[in-house]
Image: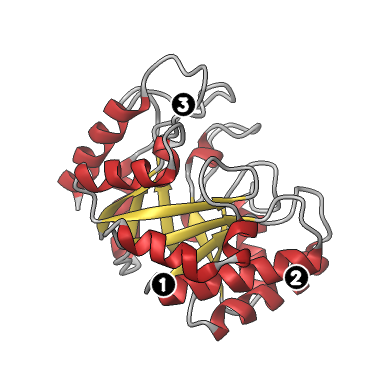
Amino acid sequence: MYVACSTLCFGTQPLDDALRTVREMRFAKADLAVHADGPHLTPAEVAADPARVAQRLRAANLPLAAVHLDTGPAAARPAREQLRAVARLARVLATPLLTVPAAPAGADLDAEADRLREWVAVAAAEGVILTAETRGGTVTADPLGAAELCRRVGGLYLTLDPSHYHAGPHGPANYDALFPLVRHVRLRDTGDAPDQFQVRVGRGGVEYGRIIAQLERCRYDRALTVDVRDLPGDPFPAEPEVRKLKFLLESLV
């Protein structure tokens, strides 16, 4: 296992500056966010000129652990083409994994399985693993729903974000059954209340040592991404917490 850093930790900076900061903080790799409503690259930008985007990212001289894709409200066909372009970008940059959100909670699970089955095939054609993130407000907000989605979609795995299971509407949820399905992890500290999704490192209830021990049992050898987001209105600056969590995780692996 090694420690990576989400570009969203420095979302108030331009992408080039965010990648430079991640590199200067001596993270092994970056976790690149490509979001329709994000502060850095958008899926439409990647689809419009993937070669230019690849050149820009190579210039940052920082390998990528994963790409976090969110196509937002794009219709099915444009979203699929954006996925194809981002998966191709991942292949060109030797990035092994692509994470996407699942459908909103309450969506038809059969329809979502059909969609993700097609997306797994698109990613696999580029040699990239597709994962669905565990995320509140989606069908993976419940650990049972996340496991069932992977059961229905061959080749689909999970990006574990335990914060969504700590601060969810039903309080801390047990997600131990998901560890064999995990291919990527994003971490911050989180309290048990819905308004404590992101707290200072050490003030929440995320048990990093236990998570790492569970991953080791499953022979997980991939990234632990620090994902302390630089959000407007937060009562504390993100960068010291990013640094603190980096050192903590490195001491545990």
| Residue at the disc numbered 2 | 115
Is 3 placed above or below 53 here?
A: above
Q: What residue appears at the point 42 percent right and 24 percent down from the top-left corner? A: 199
**Of callouts 2 and 3, the N-terminal one:** 2
CA distance for labels 2 and 3: 33 Å
- Give 150 or 94, whichever is nearer the viewer: 94
- Find out whether the residues at labels 3 and 1 contact each other: C-beta distance under 8 Å: no
CA distance for labels 3 and 1: 31 Å
| Residue at the disc numbered 3 | 191
| Residue at the disc numbered 1 | 96
Q: What residue appears at the point 44 percent right and 14 percent down from the top-left corner? A: 235
Q: Nearer the viewer, mark 3 or mark 1?
A: 1
The amino acid pointed to by label 1 is: Pro
Direction from residue 119 to residue 38 in the image, left or right: left
Confirm whether residue 181 shows in the render: no
The amino acid pointed to by label 2 is: Arg
Give the number of the disc on residue 167. Answer: none
Is 164 placed above or below 147 here?
A: above
Residue 51 horizontal/vertical position (percent): 49, 71
Confirm whether residue 196 shows in the render: yes
Residue 121 horizontal/vertical position (percent): 63, 81
Please, which residue is most extreme toward the left here? 251
Q: Secondary structure at mark 1?
A: loop
CA distance for labels 2 and 1: 21 Å
Q: What residue appears at the point 70 percent right and 53 percent down from the top-left corner? A: 139
Question: How many residues crowd around disc 3 within 10 Å: few (fewer than 14), some, or many (20 or more)?
Answer: many
Q: Nearer the viewer, mark 2 or mark 3?
A: 2
- Give 161 or 192, whichever is nearer the viewer: 161
Q: Look at the image and tell me in which quarter the N terminus lies.
A: bottom left
**Of callouts 3 and 1, the N-terminal one:** 1
